[in-house]
Amino acid sequence: FEYKRLHPNLHNYGVDMGFYKHVTSSKSKANERPTNGFFGIRLAMMLCDQINIYGFLRNWKGWTKYHYFNGEEPNSAQLSRDTAGEMPIIEQLLKTNEKLRFVHPCVIDFKCTNCTEAAVCDSKSKAPYPVPAKGYCRM
């Protein structure tokens, strides 16, 4: 009710329990409490022909905020779910579903897909975004 009071013009939609069971049906313990983003991926897989995935950073700490919309820090269960839990499931979905594409560079495999020659993924620092290549400086 607080959310509705703060955002009176936004509509809330319930999720059918059948969809919830579908998303959490993996035998993986990591999939018991999926993130909203994971629910979004699974819904998009049912509705969309092409899905571009951004974010889902495994190594966000010190590089960016955990949530773009607040300063919340994750607890240990959330960190475990994010790194050892959902990412292997998402990686498997990427391998087995052609309509999924992980667009955010430097997260899945530290390959700088679609980066300019001035940018590289730095597997040593594990930065979750491209950094300047040798000979180029940061602006």
Image: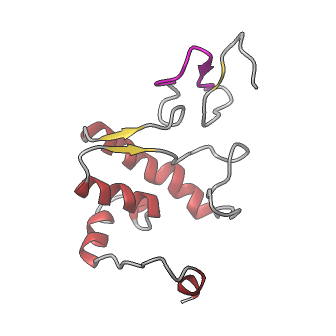
In the figure, residue 11 lies in which quadrant? bottom left
User: Looking at the image, which residue sits at the far top?
Assistant: 135
Question: What residue is shown at x 68% (from left), y 64% (from top)?
Answer: 72
Question: What residue is shown at x 60% (from left), y 34% (from top)?
Answer: 129
Q: Is residue 11 left or right of residue 129?
A: left
Magenta residues, start to end: 112-122
Q: Nearer the viewer, residue 7 or 111?
A: 7
Q: Is residue 72 left or right of residue 4?
A: right
Q: Nearer the viewer, residue 106 or 21?
A: 106
Q: Is residue 56 above or below residue 106?
A: below
Q: Is residue 78 above or below residue 115?
A: below
By secondary structure, the bulk of the magenta-drawn segment is best described as: loop
Q: Which image quarter is the C terminus in?
A: top right
Q: Is residue 47 left or right of residue 130?
A: left
Q: Position of residue 127 (x, y in %)?
A: 65, 34
Q: Position of residue 25 (x, y in %)?
A: 28, 64
The reply to whether the magenta stretch includes residue 114 is: yes
Q: How is the image coloured?
A: secondary structure
Q: Position of residue 124 (x, y in %)?
A: 66, 26
User: Looking at the image, which residue sits at the far bottom?
Assistant: 1
Question: What residue is shown at x 47% (from left), y 76% (from top)?
Answer: 10
